[in-house]
Every structure is written in C-alpha cells, then in structure tokens.
Amino acid sequence: MAAAIDIVDLTKTYGELKALDSVTLSIPEGDCFGLLGPNGAGKTTLIRILTTLIRPTSGAARVNSFDVVKDRAHVRQRIGVVPQAMTSDLDLTGFEIMDIYARFYEMEKKERLERIDELLGMVGLRERAGDLVATYSGGMRRRLEIARGLVHKPSILILDEPTIGLDPQSRHVVWELLESFRKTDKLTILLTTHYMEEAESLCDHVAIIDYGKIVALDTVEGLKRQIPQKDVVELTVGNIDLQEASQRVASVPAVNSVVVKDDRLIVATDNGANAIPELVDGIKRMGGNLTRVLLKQQTLEDVFIHFTGRPIREEEAKKVSFLLGAGVPTKWGR
C-alpha cells in the first residue's frame, strides 16, 4: 500500500537538545494513525514539521510524495488541519468561517458553495450555518472546525487532541464523524490524543513517542502483545486456605503467576476469558466460596505505561496548540 506520509531519520534539534531523534515511520493511505506520548515527547514538533510550520534539522518527511521543505505549497494543499485550540472567529457565522477557508484555497464559487453545504450537512450544522459561532456549543464548534479542515478536499487530515474538553457524548459524535469522513472521502488521518479509549476506538496503527524517539509502533492489539503482563483475573475467595488455593491455581497451564492479597487471588494469565472457567472449577473443587470474579484485560494505557514508565493521565491537561507555538524544548518554551 502506498504511503500517505513517509518519514526517514527525521531529527530536530534546539541547541544541544534533540526534540526529534532520527524518527522513521510510514503511514499508509487510508490509515487512521495515532501518535501518543507524554507532553514534551516530540509529538508537536513532528506535526509542526509535517504541516510545514518548522523545518527539520536533518532527515526527510514526505506527504503524498511531496517533500515538506521543498514542496511546502503542494503539502499544504493536500493536508487539512484541526488544532487543539478552538480557532474559529466567534464574530463570524459558521458559513462565513467555511467560506473564508474555501477562498484561501481558491475554490470556484459553485464548487465552494456545494462543498460547504455538503460538509455542514454532514456535521449537523446546516440549520445553524447563519448563526454566529459564539452561539455554538463546544461540540458544535469542534464539528465546524473538522468541516473547515476538510473544505478543500485534502487527502490527509491532521488532528491535535480533537476531543479534548468535550463531554463524552460530543466526543463519540466526533468519533462517528471521523469514521464517516474516512469512508466517504477516503481520508488518511493522523491524530494525537491523551484519551486511550479514543486511540483504541479510531486508530488502525499507533506509535508511542518518548524523548524524541519512536519507542513502539504497531496495531493496538499488536502493541498489547508486546508487553509481558497479560490479562489479570481477581478471585475473591472464602472458606479456604488462600496459600493452598494459590498453589492449586498456579498449576493451571494458562496461569503465569498468582499473588495472594487480602481475601483475593491475583492471577496473571495470557487469556483471562479462557482461563476463568478452569480457575473457578478448581476453587470450587477445593471447597472454596467464590464471591467475586473480576477480569482486567490489557489496555492501551497499560502499553503506554510499559513503554514510557508513567500513565498518560498524569500529564498536564492543557498544552499549547501546535499552531500557536508549542514544539520547542523547555529552555525555549516547550
């Protein structure tokens, strides 16, 4: 499959600090690609290079085969961008916002009006097109900005934290919109997010970046298979000696380890769903009384912690949009 974005040995330095350190990755056409990482890991720097806002120190990046340094105009024509910050002018109507952006790309009037009407209909804002953006809810403004980023029919949509600050219902509406646009416009999507559920729901492939390097890259399920700890089954047990029960449970072929904690057995296994019937049967045959069985399956959050050493939720809730100046080291404002 052809690459929508192709990056080879991309490096960006600020003095002695490397914001990006020999990053290499390829994003196939039609892929939804998630870029995860702690704040300051290099995500913003990478996206600012791909959107032609800054130049790399060395290496190469191509968007639809166009070099981000040598062919900036061609790259900009082929990408749509939705920054984290809400940037739509509150004193304009939804239609005026869309019309201004379409004019930036020199779209003819007939095509422009048809495209705006189509997009506003798709994001559920056709009836509110004549209203000031100041009257829109946060979810409506985000839907408008996604439509705005697509007005010139780009082949690649780049989104920076597309649902941050939205309520769960609005977040799911945005997810459905992105899936819909992928099908109708055959879009390639690159997004950064702090929401693991968002990455699991939307992304075909995910890269984790830390200290300027790609430390993991695979499908979501592929990433989960790379970490040593698998599913965890918690068995709350009564009327039985837990140390003896732990030895019995440890003999089950699918079990990797067993830890006794209070009145529970914490069982690590490669496949919790398959192991539970045998675990339950073994406890009952010993005369134990099972009051609770809890299965904790591997999540993308577990993967993130494994590769970066910290949960993503510990990161700052707010950061500067890549369009507004982020992407430089702390010494210079990162």
Image (tube, grey):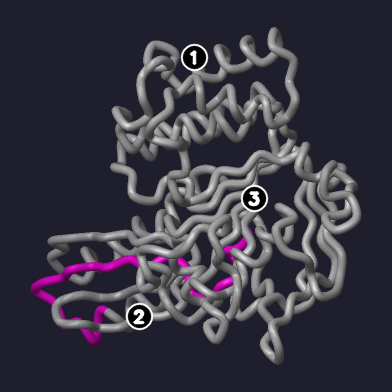
Q: Is residue 204 left or right of residue 321?
A: right
Residue at the spot of label 3:
33
State which tag comes first along the sequence, 3 or 2: 3
Residue sitting at the far bottom? 16
Q: Secondary structure at mark 1?
A: helix
Could you tell me how far apart the alpha carbons at marks 2 and 1 are, in whole angstroms?
55 Å
Q: Whole-percent x and y of residue 102? A: 65, 25
Q: Secondary structure at mark 2?
A: strand
Residue at the spot of label 1:
121
Location of residue 124 with respect to 306 vertically, above or below: above
Give the number of the mark in front: 2 or 1.
1
Range covered by the magenta-colored residues:
221-245
* Residue count near mark 1 (Cα–Cα under 10 Å), binned few <14, some 14–19, many ≥20: some
Q: Is residue 131 left or right of residue 153?
A: left
| Label number found at residue 258 | 2
Q: Quadrant of residue 118?
A: top right
